[in-house]
Every structure is written in structure tokens, then in C-alpha cells.
Image: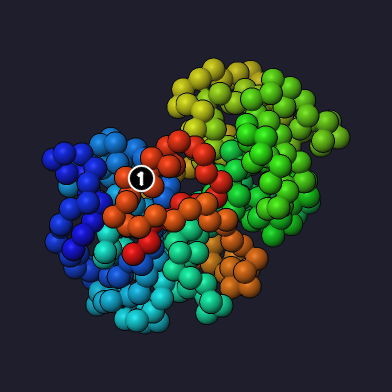
Amino acid sequence: MKAAVIGANGFEIGEVAKPVPGPSQVLVRVRASGLNRADLIVASGRMHGNHGGPGTIVGLEFAGEVEAVGRDVPTGIKAGDRVMCSGSAGYAEYAVTDWGRVARIPANNMSFTQAATLPIALQTMHDAIVTNGRLKAGESILIQGASTGVGLMGLQIAKLMGAGLVMGSSTNAGRRARLAEFGADLAIDSSDAGWADQVISATGGRGVDLIVDQISASVANANMKAAAVRGRIVNVGRLGGTEGKFDFDLHAMKRIDYIGVTFRTRSVEEVREINRRMQADLWPAVEAGKLSLPLDRTFPFTEAAAALAHMKANAHFGKIVLVQ
């Protein structure tokens, strides 16, 4: 089969063996693959957790039809099902993933392209906002890096789960202007030195209850300044750097819960539970079309390198998808 793989000459479309599903795995004929920032890391030849290096097929989410299932896959997932999945090696004609990462595409005319935009965003932001962030109805929330696909989903999930004031950040004025379409009551510019004061003012001087941070290093101390006493900060991404200054005294004074999350060190069982919880809370809204992401651009599967270059240029709004 054809796949976008790290070969002898770097990232390329090559021929590889078609995968065979293990006992707890599902084999999918891929029709569309969503792009994510981590794909840029792997495509460059670097490691993302234990994923990467020569021979690695890129891609973390995809949609298509089930072709076969392993003997230990629960009943209910069968050949012919239209599904969306998270997992590795998604830039390929076929991919396998654990059954716990598979969800049926709603029977509401959702296309494979639309479906491929959803798995990572839904899983990541439900885990960050609901499970680790412990958002309660009426609380305020700030999504740092809200104009990304995952960030836009975070705004929507926050509204759906009953957040009071929903705020999102973007350093791009045009993107900030669009955050309201996805549930933001206030859009802030995190490159503005006074943004934390703006958040404090918007929350009546109290500070924000929950920050879901996709930027990290460059905003770490300002996040703590903007947070309420006993607020929570969930570190999801590090678009602003992996290392930076950290005001330990401010952290202690505000008694902030600073929580790091990643899928790279999750067990199979933990990821299954993340998906179970996400579907329990969000699937009715997905089926009703209330949770969706804008499609920035599609590329043919064979033009995966061009699609990644488009993402690296950071000129997109919403998701980029490879189609077959």
C-alpha cells in the first residue's frame, strides 16, 4: 500500500506492507487524514514520544471504512462501518488502531473529510477541560492558542459544558475576530503585554478559573497572574516553547493546580477511558452537528508534503485534511 513515510530520503510517499490488525485492533481503509502539529515533528525526522524515526508512517487521526477487526474487538464494531479514529500511521491507504480509539461517524451526512477533523480535538479538549480541568458550570475559562483546530473545539466544548465567561487567545487579529463564531465571549492577544490585566478585568478582578494552555513557556507567568486563587492551568501544548521562566512564588501564593497532560505516556486502557468519557459527554452534540471544525483546505493524499508545508507556514484557520 502507499503511505507517507520517513524513508531514506526523508519524508516521502512510498510503498509499505499493508497492516494486519492485532487481537484488539481495527483495520481501516483510510479515506481522509487530519493534520496535527505533532505530524510536523515526526515528518521532520524527530521523535514525538516513542513515535518517529526511519520507517515511521506519519499521521494521528483518520476516517474511513472498517475492513477487518481482531478477535478481541468488542461486538458492535464490524466491517463496513464508517468510522473516525485516532492512532498512529494515519497518512496511509490503510491503518490499524486500538478499538478504544474508534467511533462511528454519525449518520447525519457527515463526510469522511469532516470526520477526520474531529478525533484528536474532541479527545484532547474533553480530557483537558472536563477531566483534568474539572470545569464546573458557570466557571470562567481561557483557551490559549484558541485559533488552532484543537483550540476552536475547546471553545465549543466549554460552552457546551456550561462555562460562564469563555475567553480565547490568538496573536492574529483576523483569527481573533472569528473566535466568537466558536463560543468565545472575549478574544485576547497573548502577545500584548497587558493581556493578563484584561482577563482579570473581564472576570471582575477575580481571575480566570481554568486556563487550557497550548502556548506554555512564553505565557507561563502571565497565565498565573491571570488565574484566580485556586485556579487550574492545564498544559496541553508548547507552541511558545518548552522552557521558560516560572514564578514559583506566584504559583504558591495563588495555590494554582498546574497540570501537565499528553497522550504520549498514556496506556491503552487510559486512552480507552478518555474516549469513553468523551463520547458519553459529547457524542449527542457531535451527532447533532453542534461540535464541528472549519475546514481550511484539503490536499490529495499524494501531496502530503505540501499539506505539511501549509501547516508549517501557520497561515491556516481550522483543519487541513488529506483526502484519498
Residue at mark 1: 306
- Residue 91's quadrant in the figure? bottom left
Asked whether, in this view, residue 82 is left or right of residue 239, the answer is: left
Q: Quadrant of the C terminus?
A: bottom left
Question: Alpha-carbon neighbours of circle 1 within 10 Å: few (<14), some, or many (≥20)?
Answer: few
Amino acid type of the residue that numbered disc 1 sits on in the rendered structure? Ala
Asked whether, in this view, residue 312 is left or right of residue 216, the answer is: left
278 w.r.t. 167: above or below? below
- Residue 76's quadrant in the figure? bottom left
Report the residue at 19% width, 68% height from top.
20
State the residue lying farthest toward the right: 204
Comparing 170 with 159, the one in front is 170
Residue 188 location (% of width, % of height): 71, 34
Q: Secondary structure at mark 1?
A: helix
Residue 273 location (% of width, % of height): 46, 61
Residue 245 location (% of width, % of height): 54, 17
Asked whether, in this view, residue 106 is left or right of residue 56, the answer is: right
Q: Is residue 101 visible?
A: no
The total of numbered circles placed on residues is 1
Report the residue at 65% width, 29% height from top.
190
Comparing 197 with 208, the one in front is 197
Give the colour scheme shown.
Answer: rainbow
47 w.r.t. 110: above or below? above
Residue 86 location (% of width, % of height): 39, 59
Q: Is residue 164 visible?
A: yes
Report the residue at 44% width, 42% height from top.
311
318 w.r.t. 292: above or below? above
Asked whether, in this view, residue 200 is left or right of residue 276, the answer is: right
Q: Quadrant of the N terminus?
A: bottom left
